[in-house]
Amino acid sequence: MGQGHFQQTSLPLEEIVSYILHSGPPSKIVVLTGAGVSTASGIPDFRSPTTGLYANLARLNLPYPEAVFTLDYFRSNPLPFYTLAKELYPGKYYPTISHAFIALLHEKGLLEMLFTQNIDCLDRMAGVPDHKIVEAHGSFKGQRCIECQKEFPEKLMLEAVESSTPVRCLDENCGGLVKPDIVFFGEGLPEVFFQKKDLVEKADLLIVMGTSLEVAPFSMLPELVRSTVPRVLFNRERVGSFGSCEYDCVVLGDCDNGVRKLAEGLGWTEELEELFLKV
Ligand code: CNA
């Protein structure tokens, strides 16, 4: 949604601190994340103007940047995807303070669910357990043939990604290309996304971090919260409909700074920094 179509409002962060500390406390916090929570770890996002992946894809000779994540293009030329996969593959990067903050919410019994668009598995590495994460766009956790859907061995996938060499299904009768279980444009989201999205409707607090909210249907999640529920945005830019609701709190800037401010208000600084050092 374009900015300026509505009166933009923002609650001060102190109001959120006091809501968490004194109104219950809210036990159902839902967190939504995107690539921006991982940029501080060194993984580029998609859409940041000069540092994002889309701004740096010229060397891959793509017809348009998103082509790298479309099945039709992948079928005709899988090399650009494998080149990018090498950059994004888990194992080279470490969680940020924002990931640690989500893990801390879990430790405190306040995290209802994390919905992430990220495919980097850094939330899990920070200590958020599997059952509290919905990877809306899949992840590098598994891989399969795009034609017959047969699973492919992880070790061979790792070698393929390391050498940026596309691999094919081990079934000789098929021979389809193999890709990690990340969701391409035009593919359906994992069933779990639809099963769990009612948790957003029931949330007592929504925290959104590091996403442009450009990709549907994920981008619709912030619209599902009840009208009296506060929504907090930690992002470098205002996105989606943030600022249009009475209980929105918009904190512009790096999300690591935003969560540190929130943790400070809550008196959690020491625990957060300790948890961050451990991950
Ligand atoms: P995006 O469209 O690139 O948007 C990123 C947003 O985060 C933008 O609004 C930036 O301004 C903002 N941002 C960047 N760095 C920071 C920061 N340090 N602090 C605060 N805000 C910041 O990425 P989305 O996640 O919204 O788009 C959805 C795509 C991106 C998903 O399908 C992902 O799979 C995909 N992606 C994931 C990764 C990853 O797993 N780390 C990396 C790159 C892309």
Image (spheres, helix red, strand yellow):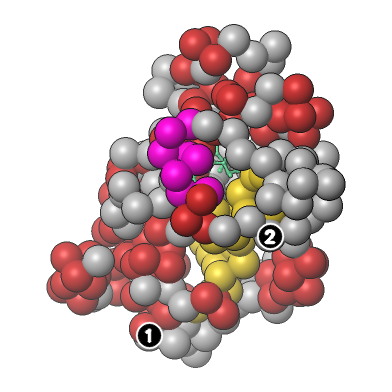
**Mark 2 — residue?**
151
Q: Say which quadrant the N terminus sits in.
A: top right
Q: CA distance from mark 1 to mark 2?
A: 37 Å
Name the quadrant containing residue 75. top right
Chain part drawn in magenta = 157-164
Percent of width and height locating residue 217: 77, 50
Q: Tally the numbered discs.
A: 2
Residue found 44% across the figure and 87% down from its top: 109
| Mark 1 residue CB less than 8 A from any atom of ligand 1 | no
Q: Is residue 161 magenta?
A: yes
Residue found 29% across the figure and 54% down from its top: 94
Residue found 63% across the figure and 56% down from its top: 152
Q: Residues within 10 Å of mark 2 (few under 14, many from 20)?
A: some
Q: Are marks 1 and 2 in contact (CB under 8 Å)?
A: no
- On screen, residue 88 versus residue 81, left or right, reads left
Amino acid beneath label 1: Lys
**Mark 1 — residue?**
108
- Which label was assigned to residue 86? none
Name the quadrant containing residue 102. bottom left
Mark 1 or 2: the one toward you: 2
